[in-house]
Amino acid sequence: MTEEIDWIARAGAKPRGRRPEYLDSPFDERMLSMLMAVIGEVSVLRERIDTIERLLDAKGVISRADIEGYQPDLETGKERNRIIRDYIARVMRGVQQDMEALAELEPPITDVIAEMEQAR
Amino acid sequence: MSANDVPPPYTAVERHGMFPEVRHDEAARFNFLAGLNRYLSGAVGAGNKLAYDRRVIPAFQAEHGREPADRHEVRRAMNRDPWHRFWSAMKRNSMEMRQQAGRALVLRQLDDLDARARAFNDGANTLQLNGDVAVPRYQAAVDIHCMPGSYHGEERPGDVSAGANYDCGIFATTGGALGALNDGGGQAVAAWVKAERPDWRPARILDIGCTVGHNAVPIALAFPDAEVIAIDTAAPSLRYGHARARSLGADNMVFRQMSGEDLSEFADASFDWVQTTMFLHELSMKALPKILAEAARVLKPGGLLFHIEQPEYGPDMPLFEQFMRDWDAYNNNEPFWSAMHTLDMKDEMAKAGFPRDRQFTVGVKAVVDERIFPPSPAGAQEDYGRAALWNAYGGWKPE
C-alpha cells in the first residue's frame, strides 16, 4: 500500500477542463453521478458474491443448488427482513427527512445564525 | 446479438511485468465498466439516431425550413434533446468512473509500481528523459480522456502513475477490442507491413507520440533486428512504457522524451519507417503540420510513412455520424479530435512534403486473439470513434 499518497482521495481527482452540463440542474448531474457509482458498486458486489458461491461450490462446502433451495426458518427469515428494512431506511433517508420537514416549517439556518449573533 | 455477446473478462488482460496487481473488486469494476460502455454504445446508443430521426430533425426543419448544414448544427440540436443529454451524461460518467477505477488501482500500489519501474529503468541508456521538453499546450490545455494529469501528470516526482492508469483502464473503454495487451493496433501495423513487403528489413523505426508504447512494442517484437525509437513528451508515460517494453522482451527499443514538432536531433533521411498510431488527433492545427513535415524529413528515400487514425469525416460521411464521432471531442476532452478529422490527410501530408502520388490509404483493424477478444468491427455495436478499425494514411517515400 502506498502510504505517501492518499490514493482514495487522489483517485477521484477532477480532470482539468470544465465539465459539460448535460441535465437541467447541477443537482441532477450529481444525483446521476452518485446513482451510476452505486449501480457500479452493486455490480461489483454481485460479482463478489458469485465468486464466493463458486468457491464454496468448488470446494464442496456448499453447492449453488443449496443456495437456490435455501429456506430460512421463520426467525431467520424475519432477521433477514430486518436487514432489508434497515437498508431501505438508509437509502430512503433523504425522502424520509423531507417528509418530516413537512410537519414543521423551520426557519433557514441564516435566521438561527442571526439570532445567535444578537447580543441580546 | 446474442445474450452471450459480452466483453471478455478483465482477468483475460495479460499481466506483463509492469501491470498492477488487480484485486477481485477492481477487476469487477472494470468488468462492469466494459459492459456499461458496450451497453451505452450498443443497446441504447441506437437511441441517439432514433431521437435524431424522430424528433430532432423534424423540429429543426420546422424551425429553419431546412436540414442541418453541418455536424455543429446537429450537435447543437441534439444537445437540446433530453434523450441525448441523458445518454451523454451517463457516458461522461462512465469515463469518469473508469478514471477513478484505474487511478485507485494504480495509486494504492504506486510504491510497488515505481519500484518495479526503477528495476527496469535505472541505469538503462534506452530510457532517455529530458526535463527541458515542455508539455505542449495541446496536451496541457485540458486533461485528455478526462485522465486527471493526462499523460504527463505525476502524483509525485518520477512516478509512473499516468502510464499505469492509462494502460490498465483502456480495457474499459474498448471492451477488450484492443486485445490482451491493448496492442491490437501495433500488431495490425506489423502484420500489414509483413504482408505488404515480406522481405523488407527496416533498420531504424521512429514512433512519434508513443505514450506507453502499446503500438510500438509489437513492431519492435516483429522486427527484432530493427532499432525502434519511441518518442513522447510525457515522462511518466515513457518511464512506464520503457519498463513495460523491457518486461515484454522488446529490448531493441529506445524511449526518448522529445516533441515530434522538433526532430532536429535526427538527421534528414535517418529512418526507414516513421509512424504514429492514434496520435494525430491529440495535437493542434499548429502542431500537426510541423510533425507531419518532420516525419517526412527524417524518413529515408524508399522508407515507409504510416499514420494510423480514425477515418476522416469527408463529404460522404453522414452528418449524424460525424456528430457521433465528435462526441469525445466535446465530452471526453479530445479538443483537436473534431477539427483533425475534417482534414484531408492526403493534402496535409502533401503540404508537409510527401508527394500525393506516393501516398496510399488502407483500412486497418486491430489484430487480437479472437478466441477471447472481440473482433473489429463489432457491426451494430459501432462505438463511434472508438472501434478498433482505422485508416492508415501512408506512403513509400520516392527513392
Image (cartoon, coloured by chain):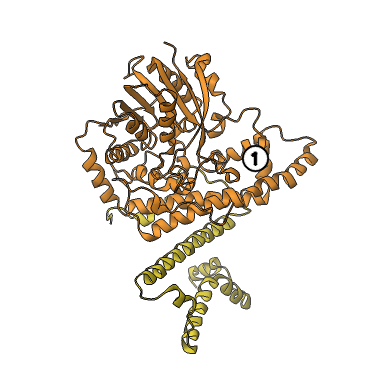
Residue A79 vertical placement versus B349 (above, below): below
Q: Is residue A94 visible?
A: yes
Display colour for chain B: orange
Q: Residue at x 32, y 27 (%)?
A: B229
Q: Residue B328 vs residue B11: left or right?
A: right
Display colour for chain A: yellow
Q: Residues within 10 Å of mark 1 (few under 14, many from 20)?
A: many
Q: Residue at x 67, y 38 (%)?
A: B74
Q: Position of residue A30 (x, y in %)?
A: 54, 57
Front residue of this view, candidates B193 and B166: B193
At label 1, the amino acid type is Arg
Q: Position of residue B364 (x, y in %)?
A: 50, 32
Q: Residue at x 47, y 25 (%)?
A: B288
Residue underneath mark 1: B75
Query: Chain under label 1?
Result: B
Q: Position of residue B312 (x, y in %)?
A: 57, 29
Residue B382 vertical placement versus B82 (above, below): above
Name, please, the residue furthest toward the left: B123
